[in-house]
Image (spheres, rainbow, N blue to C red):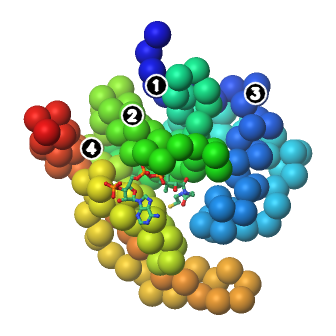
Amino acid sequence: MTKYRLRPMTEADLELVLYWRNHSEVRRYMYTTHEIGFDEHRKWFAGARRNPAVDLMIYESEGKARGFVNITRTRCKEVADWGFYLSPDAPKGTGRSLGSQALVYAFGQLGLHKVCGQALGFNERSIAFHKALGFMEEGRLRDQHFDGNDFHDVVCLGLLKCEWQIKDKGLNNE
Ligand SMILES: CC(C)(COP(=O)(O)OP(=O)(O)OC[C@H]1O[C@@H](n2cnc3c(N)ncnc32)[C@H](O)[C@@H]1OP(=O)(O)O)[C@@H](O)C(=O)NCCC(=O)NCCS
């Protein structure tokens, strides 16, 4: 049996993904931090599923769903934004595996040229995570996001396919 895989999200995943998304340790790092209700969540999923530019994926490890990845190509077919979060009880190291699998899918299956990420300035874990996967910090949008109380920087990160290929080869040789 494959130890891990990425597969499309289905309606059967809705409850679990909502539980992850509403968890305080996920929600605090998102642009919208209110508790999402099931109806709002179902509408979001229905809309995203109809959109051919959006891929909603579930990362599974040893048969258990452990994380969610969203790859959206809104600018053009070759450049995508991604977002992700893990199950709050996912073991250490799950993020790196989810990220690696998602990039194989993005650059391999989707044939992308570039993957972009955005992290709130205080989300140091996500910024370090992007850099560990080979992303470059491309800019910092100062006080770009207001959470209702405070302004936060938004850090823009980007990874080109050619950079990923070099990084990937390096990792395989380690
Ligand atoms: C970001 C996230 C996916 C990382 O997953 P993870 O399982 O913690 O990551 P891993 O253990 O695989 O670590 C991968 C890299 O992330 C970084 N990282 C992980 N935990 C970290 C921490 N506590 N502090 C700083 N960097 C950290 C490191 O660079 C690490 O590489 P290293 O182990 O070689 O140092 C996960 O924490 C998460 O879902 N966070 C909440 C949602 C979120 O912030 N999503 C992104 C929005 S932009």
Q: Amino acid at mark 1?
A: Tyr
Secondary element under disc 3, as helix, strand or loop, is helix
Secondary element under disc 4, as helix, strand or loop, is loop
Q: Amino acid at mark 3?
A: Glu
Q: Is residue 150 above or below residue 64?
A: below
Residue linked to disc 1: 4
Disc 1 vs disc 2: which is toward the camera?
1
Q: Is mark 3 within 8 Å of ligand 1?
A: no
Q: Residues within 10 Å of mark 4 (few under 14, many from 20)?
A: some
Distance from Cα at disc 4 to Cα at disc 3: 30 Å
Please name the residue shown 17% across and 34% down the image.
Answer: 172
Q: Earlier in the sequence, mark 4 or mark 3?
A: 3
- Residue 34 seen from this side: yes
Residue 66, x across and y down, in percent: 59, 37
Residue 24's tag is none
Residue linked to disc 2: 101
Q: Are discs 1 and 2 less than 8 Å apart at CB?
A: yes
Distance from Cα at disc 4 to Cα at disc 1: 25 Å
Quadrant of the drawing holding the C terminus: top left
- Residue 158 seen from this side: no
Q: Earlier in the sequence, mark 4 or mark 1?
A: 1
Residue 7, x across and y down, in percent: 54, 25
Q: Is residue 58 above or below residue 27?
A: above
Disc 3 vs disc 1: which is toward the camera?
1
Residue linked to disc 4: 113
